Amino acid sequence: MDQQWLWVCSVAHVRAMLNGLRILLVDDDPVVRALYVCVLQEAGAAVLSSGLATEALQLIDLQAPDAVVTDLKMPEHDGIWLLEELRARLPGVPVIAVSGRLHDAGLVDLRRLGFFDVLAKPIGLSVLTETVARAAGR
C-alpha cells in the first residue's frame, strides 16, 4: 500500500512539473522521438515534434514553444543550425541539445554556442523532464 501511494505522489509531481508548457521536440529517430514525447506529455507539457529541423521551424510558426529539445545529429540540418535559426526567430527560447556522441570538450563548446544544456544519450527520463523544467524557469 505504501509503495502505491509513493508511486501516485511521484506521478502527480512529474505531471505538475511541466504543466501548461509548450515544448518543441526535434529528433530524427522516430522511436526516441515517441518516447520523449510520451515522457514530456506525462509531465504535463503540450508537445509538438518533428524529425527534421526545417519542419520544426514551420511548427514554431503555428505555436511558439516555451522550450526546445533537439538532437544534434540529424539529416539535412543539424541541431546547431536549428539553434541559430531559433535564435533569429525566438531569441529568448531555451534550447536543450541531446546527442549520443558527446565528450567533455564538446559540451563546453555547445554551451558557448547558446544551448541551455546538453544531455548525452541515453538520457534518464527524469533528467529530461527536470532539465526542461529548469529551462522554462520552473
Image (tube, rainbow, N blue to C red):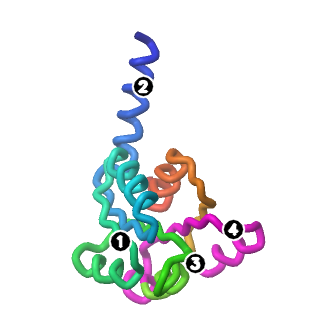
**Residue 50 numbered tag:** 1
Residue span colored magenta = 86-114
Locate residue 119, reporting x and y percent.
60, 61
The residue wearing badge 2 is: 7
Q: In which quarter of the view is residue 114 placed? A: bottom right
Q: Nearer the viewer, mark 3 or mark 1?
A: 1
**Looking at the image, is mark 3 or mark 4 earlier in the sequence?**
4
Q: Quadrant of the N terminus?
A: top left
For discs 3 and 4, the disc positioned in front in the rendered view: 4
Mark 4, mark 2: which one is toward the viewer?
Answer: 4
- Residue for point 32% across, 58% down: 21
Residue 57 in the image: x percent, y percent?
Answer: 34, 82
Please name the amino acid that badge 1 sits on. Answer: Ser
Other-residue count near label 4 (Cα within 10 Å), few / some / many at <14 / 14–19 / ≥20: some
Relative to 101, is 12 above or below? Answer: above
Q: Amino acid at mark 4?
A: Leu
Side of 37 where 108 appears, left or right: right
